[in-house]
Amino acid sequence: MKTNRSSAYLNLSPRAVQRLFQLALTGLWSWFALKFFLTEGKPAALVASALCLLTGVVAAIVVFLSDLSFIAHAPEQDIDEYQLKQRNRAYLATLRYGCGALALAWIARAVGGPRAVVSVNVLDNFILVLFLTLLIAPAGFLAQRLLADEDAPAR
């Protein structure tokens, strides 16, 4: 394993990165969902929405600053063959996640029919959540792969 990493990256275990990734996904997508229920008469929903957004963004920043994020976004010459193989698997999982999110949005729009007018604000929120989660997805899926390899019995 090469050690050309900058000291700017946080040395977190794969389990910590995976949990933070899950927390970021839950927080960001919960914020997106709660935005549909916000009204002036429900301050509790506004507070819950703000907490979800804050939790999701902070967790996403920590994941993005982790050393697994370095491996997920490093040039090929900076990582070894095993890390490259794991990174490519994480990229494929990220592609599947992104395509799945876009497909669900398309299906939701198609099922809603002419009544489902998507406002610019809803579209902006969706793009923001998708962008932030796609930034951290390679590191999160890499952490999942590393944990699966640790749990697998040796051959």
Image (cartoon, helix red, strand yellow):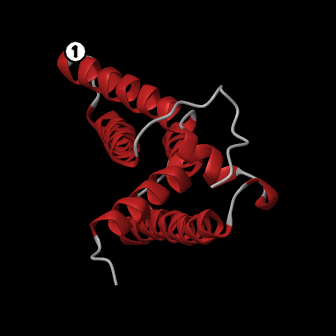
Q: Residue at x 27, y 76 (%)?
A: 153
Q: From the viewer's side, name the closer residue of 14 and 101.
A: 14
- Who's the residue at 42% across and 31% down the image? 59
Q: Is residue 54 placed above or below 76 in the rendered structure? A: above
**Would residue 155 be visible to someone looking at this image?**
yes
**Total count of labels:** 1
Check disc 1 and give the amino acid type.
Pro
Farthest bottom residue in view: 155
Specify the quadrant that holds the N terminus.
bottom right
* Quadrant occupied by the C terminus: bottom left
Vertical side of 106 occupied by 26: above or below:
above
> To which quarter of the image does residue 113 belong?
bottom left
Looking at the image, residue 92 sits to the left or right of residue 56; the answer is right
Residue 105 image position (x, y, % from top left) = 45, 62
Pick the residue in front: 76 or 88: 76
Q: Residue at x 39, y 32 (%)?
A: 56
Image coordinates for residue 66, horizontal then vertical, percent: 53, 37
Q: Provide residue 53's location: percent of width, then percent of height.
A: 39, 28
Relative horizontal placement of residue 133, taking residue 151 as reference (left or right): right
Vertical placement of residue 82 versus 31, above or below: below
* Residue depicted at 67% across the width and 69% down the height: 81
Query: Splitting the image into 4 quarters, where does residue 8 fall?
Result: top right
* Left or right position of 21 against 139: left
Determine crowd level at label 1: few under 14, some 14-19, many 20+ residues with C-alpha closer than 10 A.
few
Of 137 and 73, nearer the camera is: 73
Where residue 48 sits, quadrant-wise, is top left
Q: Is residue 46 above or below residue 108?
A: above
User: Which residue carries the number 1 mark?
Assistant: 43
Please provide percent x and percent y for residue 107. Answer: 42, 71
**Residue 119 seen by the camera:** no
Secondary element at tag 1: helix
